[in-house]
Amino acid sequence: MRKYSSNLAFVDLLFNLLVGFTSLFIIAFLMINPIAKQGEVTPPVMMMIQSHWDDESSRDVDLWVKTPSGVVGYTSKDTGSAKLERDDLGKESDTYEVNGEKHVVKRNYEVVNFTAMPDGEYIVNVHMFSTILNAPESVRITITVLGPFKEVWSGDIILDIPKRELTAISFLVEDGKIVDLNTDIQVKIRVPTSRIP
């Protein structure tokens, strides 16, 4: 009598192993994270306007920005698309306390951050809030867009009269782009309050 052997079980096992490895390969391939683009960041802030003056100065210099959605300054710090993040009072705001110990950070700096850039006209002013001014104060204004990072404009404004407000620059935003920069006009935008003479 002859014996017949069958390799059917072995072939079935090989086929199941092949299907299993293929499935694992496909699952592993789907779980691979895409390579992050280096240096590419999507910041929540689209534009910053900064003012900086002598870090040793005791003077209070205020940054005011007129946007299509309103005026930003120390009396109205948020318009929805723009926000005054730091209102510097000169030396008065340079001291902070931690665990009863006083620390001094000499920095005179104000910044307005924009989370949106609606189309329209923007005016950037600086105002010498201090009433005592025995020497002129130079204020550096910088406009920077983020994502991609680019410094659009930077310039110095000289404040030589107490309570004086000067326009540093005006510009237009069209389709999210800054156009038509102008340093020749003077427009008062500061929102007066009862405590401001």
Image (cartoon, rainbow, N blue to C red):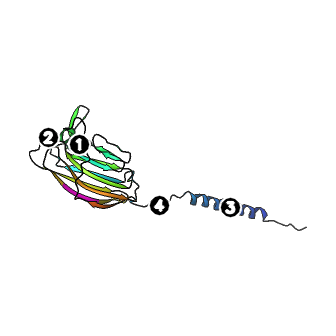
Q: Which mark lies nearer to you, 1 or 4?
A: 1
- The residue identified by callout 3 is 19
Quick check: is 95 in the magenta stretch? Answer: no
Circle 3 crowding by C-alpha within 10 Å: few under 14, some 14–19, many from 20: few
Residue in the foreground of this view, choosing between 14 and 104:
104
Q: Which mark lies nearer to you, 4 or 3?
A: 4
Task: Work out how far the residue at label 1 is from the one at label 2, CA to CA, in angstroms.
Answer: 16 Å
Circle 1 crowding by C-alpha within 10 Å: few under 14, some 14–19, many from 20: many
Please tell me which of labels 1 and 4 falls first in the chain: 4
Please tell me which of labels 1 and 3 falls first in the chain: 3
Q: What is the secondary structure assignment of the residue under circle 4?
A: loop
Please tell me which of labels 1 and 2 falls first in the chain: 1
| Quadrant occupied by the C terminus | top left
Residue, x 25% and y 47% (percent of image)?
Answer: 63
**Extreme top residue here?**
100
Provide the residue span drawn in magenta.
152-156
Residue, x 55% and y 56% (percent of image)?
Answer: 31
Q: Are marks 1 and 4 in contact (CB under 8 Å)?
A: no
Three-letter code, disc 4: Ile
* Apparent side of residue 30 relative to residue 58 in the rendered image (left or right): right
- The residue identified by callout 1 is 88
Three-letter code, disc 3: Val
Three-letter code, disc 2: Thr
Circle 4 crowding by C-alpha within 10 Å: few under 14, some 14–19, many from 20: few
